[in-house]
Image (spheres, rainbow, N blue to C red):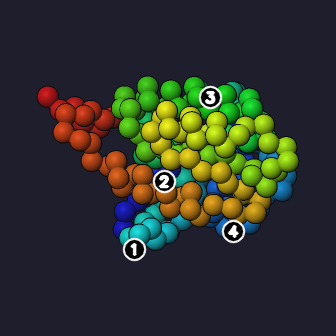
């Protein structure tokens, strides 16, 4: 059974913990309690292949931003979450992606861009088109989710496994964080 290290990143209050807890336990966290770092494990089957996900739910506050390099260094796949009812959280996600590329020293890192809180459609500040365009720029999948309603939550974690499987072997001549081809 393959194990995958997934890191969930995004600003504070975008629903990183809510998505992760909804996926792992099937329940929704109603109150906001800022995370420093939480670690979860869950066995899943993706495309008939059993896997274990080790999910690191990270702090969204700048106070703990210095810990991000270590999370990124150890992660294999990244879920970048913004709240679609908060334009600033969408802007905040861009430097996080840049940091992943810088730390990994590799452009094609398995990641998914996620607009969370689709259940609050009436309060939307970030259009689906904006999310899709950014994901296209980054050459990564884009999804909109709701931790509250469990919309696309299981699909999100299955897709990050697919991304990690798909990009686990660099193309000839490419460089990644663990190999340098001379």
Q: Earlier in the sequence, mark 4 or mark 2?
A: 4
Mark 4 touches mark 1? (CB < 8 Å) = no
Foreground mark, 4 or 2, reads 2
Mark 4 touches mark 2? (CB < 8 Å) = no
Label 3 sits on residue: 65
Which residue appears at 44% of the width and 30% of the height?
Answer: 101
Using the image, determine if residue 88 lies above or below residue 71.
above
Which picture quadrant has residue 66? Answer: top right
Using the image, determine if residue 15 lies above or below residue 137.
below
Foreground mark, 4 or 1, reads 1
Question: Observer-nearest residue: 70 or 152?
Answer: 152
Using the image, determine if residue 172 lies above or below residue 118.
above
Q: Earlier in the sequence, mark 1 or mark 2?
A: 1
Q: Earlier in the sequence, mark 3 or mark 2?
A: 3
Disc 2 element: helix
Most extreme residue toward the left is 182
Kindly report the distance in space between the C-alpha atoms of the residues bearing marks 4 and 1.
21 Å
Label 1 sits on residue: 48
Which residue appears at 69% of the width and 68% of the height?
Answer: 26
Q: Earlier in the sequence, mark 3 or mark 4?
A: 4
Which residue appears at 47% of the width and 43% of the height?
Answer: 140
Label 4 sits on residue: 26
- Badge 3 density bin: few <14, some 14–19, many ≥20, Cα 10 Å: few
- Badge 2 density bin: few <14, some 14–19, many ≥20, Cα 10 Å: many
Disc 3 element: helix
Question: Observer-nearest residue: 53 or 153?
Answer: 153
Location of the C terminus (image quadrant): top left
Place of residue 115 in the rendered image (x, y in percent of width and height, measured from the top left): 67, 45
């Amino acid at each position: 059974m393959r194990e995958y290290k997934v890191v969930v990143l995004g600003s504070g209050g975008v629903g990183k913990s809510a998505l992760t807890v909804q996926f792992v336990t099937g329940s929704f966290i109603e109150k906001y309690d800022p995370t420093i770092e939480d670690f979860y494990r869950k066995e899943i089957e993706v495309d008939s292949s059993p896997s274990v996900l080790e999910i690191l739910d990270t702090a969204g506050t700048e106070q703990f931003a210095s810990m991000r390099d270590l999370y990124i260094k150890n992660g294999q796949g990244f879920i970048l979450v913004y709240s679609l009812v908060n334009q600033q959280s969408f802007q905040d996600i861009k430097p996080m992606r840049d940091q992943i590329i810088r730390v990994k020293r590799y452009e094609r890192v398995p990641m998914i861009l996620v607009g969370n809180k689709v259940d609050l459609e009436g309060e939307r500040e970030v259009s689906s088109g904006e999310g899709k365009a950014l994901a296209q720029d980054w050459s990564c999948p884009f999804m909109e989710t709701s931790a509250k309603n469990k919309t696309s939550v299981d699909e999100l974690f299955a897709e990050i496994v697919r991304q990690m499987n798909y990009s686990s072997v660099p193309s000839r001549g490419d460089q990644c964080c663990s190999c340098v081809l001379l």
